[in-house]
Image (cartoon, helix red, strand yellow):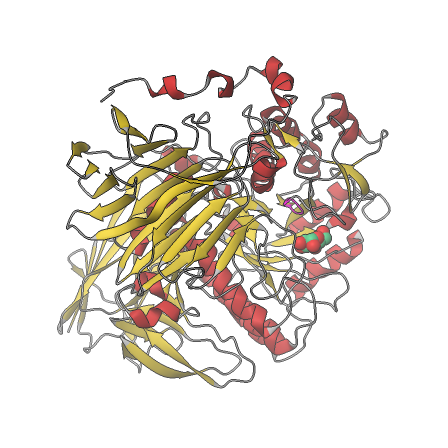
Amino acid sequence: MENLTNLDLMIDPALKVPDENNEEKFLNNPIVTLGPITKQYLKSVKNYITDGNRFVFSDGASKVQISVISDEIIRVRMAPQGTFLADFSYAINPYDHIITEVKFTETELQYLIATPKVTCAVTKADFLISFIDRNGNLMSSDAKPMHYEENVQFGGYYVYCSKTCQATEDFYALGDKATEFNLRGKRQVLWNTDTYAFAKNQDPLYRSIPFYMSLNKGYCYGIFYDNTFKTHYDFAVESHDCTSFWSDGGELNYYYIHGPQMVDVVKRYSMLTGTHQMPPMWALGFHQCRWSYYPDKKVKQIANTFREKKIPCDAIYLDIDYMNGYRCFTWNDRYFPDPKQLLTELDEIGFKTVVIIDPGIKVDDNYWVFKEGKANNYFCRRCDDYFMEGNVWPGRCQFPDFTNPKVREWWGGLFQGLLDAGVDGVWNDMNEPAVFGSGSFPDDVRHNFDHHRGSHRKAHNVYGMQMVRATYEGLQKLQKNKRPFTITRAGYSGVQRYSSVWTGDNVASWEHLKLANVMCQRLSISGISFCGTDIGGFTGEPDGELFTRWIQLGVFTPLMRAHSAGDTREREPWSFGEPFESICRKFIELRYKLLPYLYSAFWQHYKYHMPVLRPVIMLEPNEQINHYREDEFSFGDSILICPVLQPGITNRKVYLPKGTWYDYWNNQKYKGGKEFVINTPLDSMPIFVKAGASVPEYPVMQYVNEVELEFLTLKTWYSEMEEKSIIYEDHGENFAYKLDIYLEKTITVRGTNGSFVMEQTMFGMYTPRYEKYEHIVYGLPFKVKKVVVDGKEMKKYSVDATNVLSFTTTKQFKKIEILA
Ligand code: GLC
């Protein structure tokens, strides 16, 4: 057998990154046609080479590279003609993965690459790849050898992979599909598409997240298929025992992500593709949007009404009409004669302003952005060198090539003027990219692809992600130490490193409320925790009940933004009168109370890769009954949400996972593992807290930092089992947390019949400004006789008629003993 050590020898030098001056030469190379189309399957393995943790097997023509990324992640690449493309990915985030040991062995029938957690086997006779856990369980195996087909029009190959599928196997994730949560029995396509008023089961939608998980009898693995071309999935449709994915071009390049728990797979996918940064705290408040609030007086009137009606809100949005003729980075001086003054006034009453910026730049030689883009050759061009032109809001437009690092840098700098006017956040829309009439760019549009060049077929799915990356990185540079806030419609795996995401132009219907719930959970387990939907439905008219139920769900989506199309009736939390207004207020207030809890959940996402929303199937993957339960989810570690998604119902069945739960509203205790019927009057929604949870709460504020905190409320629910809760605090707006200037507190509790002990440990260098905790303890199974804090008996505490205990301690307490 050959034993080369330098795998780079195998990369065709012509495919290596060209130097920049040579770029045009490469781009103008004629398209080569490659002969008749036939599907080619890998044949028997003829030889292999090894190089550290990389192994390359060949059938004489094609090559397959298998590399160990970590003990639990193994990457597979297939080069149909034996030449790997230069290795480049927009999705993968640098991360120190741990590789303990890799063993390579050859048996009579196969090659084995083993880490302490998983073994990858390659059969010699038919080149089938499988993954086996350390107990010998077969997690995943090829149903047929990887295969490919020449693309005579563009060059390159269609590439295919098929995995066997068991009768009990189900499938999850894939980003933003508007269909049932479990993807078994479905075909899906990834091709970013502007889908106004999308319908249930419509596909593809706005984002492409090529990551799915298989769950079979509690065992989970994931496949992240890092290919940016149009990609197709078949989850046991064509054949009930086979799941396939394939693309219209590029390399077959996937990562097998080992579990065995679903939560492990989700976390490892996040390690591969990155997480959101900590959002500015205000971005977790309520956002009010509409297409569009104008002129300036209208914006002020809306903001003032929030304050008069005492409905908390942190952000107001300016949709496209704030611009001059929809020219990005300009203001319409008739509607907004003095933006700085307006934004200052909004800021004075605690409103942040978020403005929309689309990718289409109006073709207008008197418009500075167009002139700069044109002079510097920043706009996309067709294969024959004409500019890519298409109509969007401003009329005829050209489009920056955001896959060019120079263009991203230029774009990032364009935000200076908006920031000077006082803008706080940026909303990137239409970045699939959307073009009126044709839908998007034609396939032949050329892209820089960070000097790796590509047609639009390759760059389409990453265009929006690179746009919002340019926006985010620009804001970060200009705002220095202040955390940017961005929201995007389109994206590809890894987009979470640069932005929050909303699900696009949904509809005001009960069916869409259900979809909103499923889509946010799906996004969350697909690496995109900071997600939300247009509360109320973008198009169409919700009635007061639907809007109110959507606000209730929205409290528990990480991004909470109400938005509506311009041709709909007014859509603010007060627009439906009473009792809807009061109920919306009550729930938005709940969001504000739970801000420190949500912020802590974000920290757990950023630091420990936990998704913020956790579907019930992730909590109890062994329970087959949960495979089709899609409406309930855990919001952070300890709060279970059972939203009301149907009109007119006065109760609903909820399933509580095993363990003890308390009703958040009345503290009634439940033993989980079964279903209960819970009343659902319009002013309520079933919310349960896990026994042993310590949930931090703020007092209601009209906006983040409205008042200085005097104390933090800590609500704790009794548990016999030991339970831990994490509370995270930091400055809220800057990047000091990256230098360890934060405080991570762990509250550990455990109870017996005669005592309940709460202990606090702290890590980090941040000092909150409040001094005290106000403790409220629920569910104590005994009459309290004594409360001892750090060895000292407390004189003052109170117990109400329902045995709820309240007392105050310093924020530094170490140990509280509540004794019978
Ligand atoms: C798109 C967006 C929508 C926005 C509208 C006008 O339809 O999805 O949110 O309001 O464009 O900018």
The residue shown at (42%, 51%) is 244
| Quarter of the figure that contains the N terminus | top left
Q: Residue 617 placed where, x, y %?
A: 34, 64
Quadrant for residue 254, please give it.
top left
Drawn side of residue 414 relative to residue 503, left or right = right
Q: Residue 230 placed where, x, y %?
A: 55, 44
- Most foreground residue, 246 or 607: 246
Q: Residue 170 placed where, x, y %?
A: 36, 62
Quadrant for residue 475, please give it.
top right
The residue shown at (22%, 47%) is 132
Q: Is residue 637 magenta?
A: no
Q: Would you say residue 84 is visible in this rendering?
A: yes
Is 428 located above or below residue 594 in the figure? above
| Quarter of the figure that contains the C terminus | bottom left
- Most foreground residue, 640 or 757: 640
Q: Residue 73 placed where, x, y %?
A: 30, 40
Q: Is residue 429 magenta?
A: yes
- Most foreground residue, 156 or 600: 156
Q: Disc count in the image? A: 0
Drawn side of residue 780 relative to residue 704, left or right = left
Bounds of the magenta segment: 428-432
Drawn side of residue 158 relative to residue 262, left or right = right
